Amino acid sequence: LSQEKLDKSRQERLYFDSYSDVTIHEEMIADHVRTNTYRMAILRNSESMRGKVVLDIGAGTGVLSMFCVQAGAKKVYAVEACSIAEQAAKIVKHNNMEEKIEVIRGTVESVDLPEKVDVIVSEWMGYALLHESMLNSVLFARDRWLRPGGVLLPNRAELYIAPVTDPVVEERLHFWYTIKGQYGIDMSCMSDFARRCMMNSDITVRTVAVEDVLSHPVRFAELDLHSVTAEELRSVRGEFRCESFGSAAVNAFCVYFTVTFPCPDKPLVLSTGPFSPETHWQQALLYLDAPVDVLQDTAVTGEVSMYPSEESARHICIRVDYTIGEQRRQSKTFSIPDWSSDAQP
Amino acid sequence: LSQEKLDKSRQERLYFDSYSDVTIHEEMIADHVRTNTYRMAILRNSESMRGKVVLDIGAGTGVLSMFCVQAGAKKVYAVEACSIAEQAAKIVKHNNMEEKIEVIRGTVESVDLPEKVDVIVSEWMGYALLHESMLNSVLFARDRWLRPGGVLLPNRAELYIAPVTDPVVEERLHFWYTIKGQYGIDMSCMSDFARRCMMNSDITVRTVAVEDVLSHPVRFAELDLHSVTAEELRSVRGEFRCESFGSAAVNAFCVYFTVTFPCPDKPLVLSTGPFSPETHWQQALLYLDAPVDVLQDTAVTGEVSMYPSEESARHICIRVDYTIGEQRRQSKTFSIPDWSSDAQP
């Protein structure tokens, strides 16, 4: 055994990172919930699209731009900073849409469009909504390029929280109790160390099973994309109060988001919550330092703050101040580890 | 879409790295093939162990050291450089073995033992055997601390290669042809880009299915751990020649290893090949730039060289010079990406 050896996480990276240029786009498009909801939202907005000018921010392979042409857009500016823009241009040409879609390689902050736009479409959401998101770029473009009364797709985002129990943690802690039966060595004392390792302050991206959600999720923040400012995004916060469904051990909070598209009949919602079909965003899990037992109707109250980390504006921190039942108020701040400065294990 | 968004690989990291301190050890011990083979090898060597002094290099949680005590060792020096050594000391105490096992935190190069040892046991193997392995440390300890005629567990390592076909690649290339049916957009031209991304020169760690191995694997190198030198490890090479089982498209080579434990009756082999039960080492996949069709008995010949990368001595490079059938000789050099210097996508 040696920590010099690659661990599971690095093993996963070995598999996936060699593919990453294409994998990221494959994953986005293969996320049918995401891609279909965007497509339906765009097609249902064909009245706003027909004969209009659209800006697609972070266009990637250009799939949303092409949906806009399918919906009748006259012109789409597909802005993409990364080299995938070259592929987007090829795909656009392959679909005979090069008259209507102009792929522009660059950031939306630096790009100079020949006209204002009627619609902005963008898939800007990151993990826990704001982690590494492009929302600031969307707001910049809204203020700079969107015609007054123009349409934003999506135009609203909401953040939710719920207490959860994570059976994976219990299972993994239990693992250390199974060694004795197999190898005659009692390793049960490793479960303390395992708990400390697992219940750390990293935001963990995972799928939470419906049955592990211990209360109705509570919306703690809402962003109206027509009015929210970059300044307001520097501190997104809200309170929550919920009651537990039954007896269980709370060992984490789960945070997720929805975004809403305006549509003529009724709004279309893309939910990334545990009660909706799975998306690649999954849910953000925030582990408590230790599990807290709750009974039916135990109150779980608190406040959530989301703000950019001091080291990197693209990295999100989530602070949760919470009270579970009769416990005293606790506070824990979570962040997504910064892999770029990650030392080798 | 935006490359700023976390891709699949980073998502995996989010899941796994928050757990990494404990996950690495959990994974090692949960790898039953590995743990049981070591345990059997140690117990079957109880004649060499009974009343003897053992050195465990990279002891981790100390599990191999405890197996040695189970086999009758008088004294085990469990050398571990990482902080997991603290946990090892606790587990040893918990099992009342603290009289027999001395956990020493440090590198084996720096440690000063009070005596020479009769046995060295170590689980030093990395991906593709030599990637980030501790074998140099084992050789150092062998020369410095092993009594003449002492036992090495394991005492031999062998490297194998076989041409393979990877259906995952074909499936992922095909994905881009399925978009048109679903969304009315022809993205088939992305499959060229996908092929370039996937068939790169990164070593990919994966499990190769038995049915995807296209010939009998060929042993191209063998290391006798009693005699091999650090200098020899700087260039491990060998030739191979095999004939394909049938008609297929070769799109990769698969490299794996075995290690052998001397045992009184017959040697015990721990194989990480595709024809043996899966281990956490899986296999190393080396993708060709483009698939090559073979028929039954098409000759695949070549030479493999493994050597440390120039940037980092712990990082392995694998160069394969190969000829498939009537094709001209080709050459490709592979390495495992260095994550520590990895930029954000």
Image: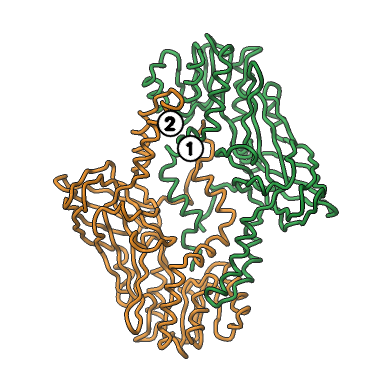
Chain colours: A orange, B green
Q: CA distance from mark 2 to mark 1?
A: 17 Å
Name the outermost residue toward the right.
B326
Neighbour tally class for label 1: few under 14, some 14-19, many 20 plus, Cα within 10 Å: some
Position of residue B140 relative to residue A236, above or below, is: above
Mark on residue B83? 2
- The picture places residue A55, in percent across and down from the top left corner, at 46, 80
Left or right of residue A89: residue A156: left
Left or right: B58, with B264 as reference point: left
Above-or-below relation of A32 to A325: below
Residue B278 is left or right of residue B326, and the answer is left
Seen at 49% across and 43% down, the residue is A343
Disc 1 residue type (three-letter): Glu
Disc 2 versus disc 1: nearer the observer: 1
- Which chain does the numbered disc 2 sit on? B
> Is residue B259 toward the left or the right of residue B32 in the image?
right
The answer to the question of whether label 2 and label 1 lie on touching residues, with beta carbons closer than 8 A, is: no
Q: Mark 1 — on which chain does it sit?
A: B
Q: Position of residue A321 (x, y in %)?
A: 22, 52
Residue that lies at the very extreme toward the bottom in this rendered image: A51
Q: Helix, strand, or loop for circle 2? A: loop
Please name whichever residue, B295 or A112, is drawn nearer the observer in this view of the structure: B295
- Going from N to C along the chain, the mark reached first, 2 or 1, is 1
Residue extending farthest to the top is B51
What residue appears at the point 55 percent right and 53 percent down from the top-left corner?
A16
Say which quarter of the image contains residue A242: bottom left
Residue labelled with disc 1? B27
